[in-house]
Image (cartoon, grey):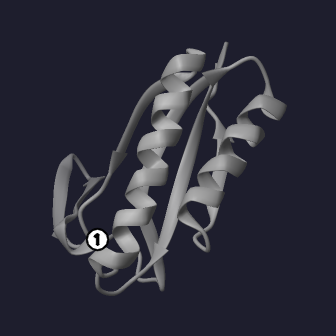
Amino acid sequence: MQQYLLSIYQPDGPTPPPEVLDGIMKKLDALNADLKTAGAWVFAGGLHPPSTATVLRAADGDTLVTDGPYAEGKEHLGGFTIIAVPDLDAALAWGSRLADAVAPLPVEVRPFQA
C-alpha cells in the first residue's frame, strides 16, 4: 500500500461560524469513518492557525528560531489526512470526497516517498 497526504488549504482569516463549520465537521467525521471501515485511514488532524507556528532553521551549526509561519501567503495548511491505498486512482477518489466535504477549499493529493 502506498501512503498519500491529503492536504486541505484554507484562506487566512477567522474560523467559519458554527452554522458553516458544523456541517463541514459532520462530513469530515463521516469521511474518516468510511476511511477507517475501508482500512485506508492512517491519521488525520486539523491545525491551529499559522500564527502558532514556530520555524526552525539550521545555519552555521546553530538553530534560528522564528515565531509565525515560514511564508506569508493568503492560504495556509489547515488540516490533513494520511491514507494508505493501492494506487493514485484510489487516493484521488478519497481526495475527491475530502474536497467535497470541505468545498470550496482545495485539497492537494501527494504520495509519500517509498
The answer to which image quadrant residue 83 occupies is top right
Q: Quadrant of residue 6?
A: top right
Taking the image as drawn, is residue 50 in sight?
yes
- Name the spot of residue 16 as percent of width and height, x first: 34, 80
Q: In the image shown, does 4 or 35 lie closer to the viewer?
A: 35
| Residue sitting at x 40%, y 76% | 20
Disc 1 element: helix
In the rendered picture of this protein, how many numbered marks are placed on residues?
A: 1
Left or right: 77, with 19 as reference point: right
* Residue under the image location 21 percent in, 75 percent down: 51
* Residue 66 pos. (x, y %): 18, 68
Foreground pick, 29 / 11: 29
In the rendered structure, which amino acid carries the disc numbered 1? Answer: Pro
Which residue is at the far right? Answer: 89
Reply above or below: 53 against 58. below
Quarter holding the N terminus? top right
Check disc 1: other Cα within 10 Å, few if <14, some if 14-19, many if 20+. Answer: some
Report x, y in % for residue 29: 41, 43
Above or below for 80 versus 22: above
Residue 27: image location, x then y, percent:
49, 52
Residue of label 1: 50
The structure residue drawn at horizontal position 26% and vertical position 70%, both measured from the top left corner, is: 49
What residue is rendered at 46% in x and 49% in y? 28
On the question of residue 70 being in view, the answer is no
Question: 84 or 29: which is nearer to us?
Answer: 29
